Image (tube, rainbow, N blue to C red):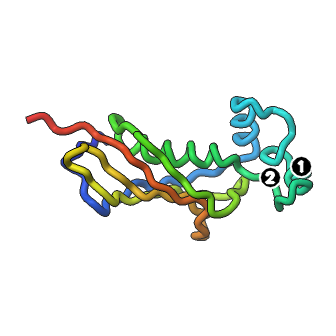
């Protein structure tokens, strides 16, 4: 759905979107990223040797999920900045809930801000962040 700057209000929700980072998706992501060898993201054994409970989703992949959440909200949305805090490790093969809420609207700069979240389906917050983006203005 196309959205315009003038149509967005504080408190507007982005999402939610649900997705699962499967073992195969993490492996494909790591190959594209240039980390094709067995590592803490693709191997339970390597992850456990490094002190993790299991293989984990790469942080940059979680950031990509949040960027996608925001950019799919409107086809003409332009993401300017995404800043995240990793609160917990994101596991493979678990249902994830991605969602956000618009928290600021700068009329002068034409920018919007939203708090964005990556949670497990049971509500545990894994990643939190802030997205800064722009939307086109209505003509006239």
> What residue sits 73% from the left and 53% below the top?
92
> What residue sits 44% from the left and 43% below the top?
81
Q: Looking at the image, is mark 2 or mark 1 earlier in the sequence?
A: 1
Query: In the image, residue 82 lies at what x, y percent?
Result: 48, 46
Q: In this picture, is 19 found above or below 120? A: above
Query: In the image, residue 42 lies at what x, y percent?
Result: 81, 44
Q: Left or right of 105: which side holds 86?
A: right
SS label for mark 2: loop
Q: Left or right of 38: which side holds 70?
A: left
Query: In the image, residue 132 lies at what x, y percent?
Result: 39, 47
How many neighbours does mark 2 have within 10 angstroms: few (below 14), some (14-19), or many (20 or more)? many
Of 119 and 48, the residue lying toward us: 48
**Circle number at residue 55:** 2
SS label for mark 1: helix
In the picture, the quarter occupied by the N terminus is top left
> What residue sits 63% from the left and 44% below the top?
61
**Circle number at residue 46:** 1
Q: Left or right of 114: which side holds 42?
A: right
**Circle number at residue 137:** none
């Amino acid at each position: 759905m196309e959205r315009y700057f003038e149509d967005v209000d504080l408190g507007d929700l982005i999402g939610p979107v649900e997705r699962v980072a499967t073992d195969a998706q993490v492996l494909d992501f790591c190959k594209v990223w240039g980390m094709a060898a067995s590592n803490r993201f693709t191997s339970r054994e390597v992850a456990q040797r490094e002190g993790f409970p299991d293989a984990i989703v790469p942080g940059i992949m979680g950031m990509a999920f949040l960027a996608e959440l925001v950019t799919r909200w409107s086809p003409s949305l332009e993401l300017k900045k995404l800043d995240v805090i990793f609160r917990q490790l994101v596991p493979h093969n678990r249902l994830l809930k991605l969602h956000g809420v618009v928290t600021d609207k700068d009329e002068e700069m034409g920018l919007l801000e939203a708090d964005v979240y990556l949670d497990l389906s049971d509500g545990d917050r894994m990643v939190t962040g802030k997205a800064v983006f722009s939307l086109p203005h209505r003509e006239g």
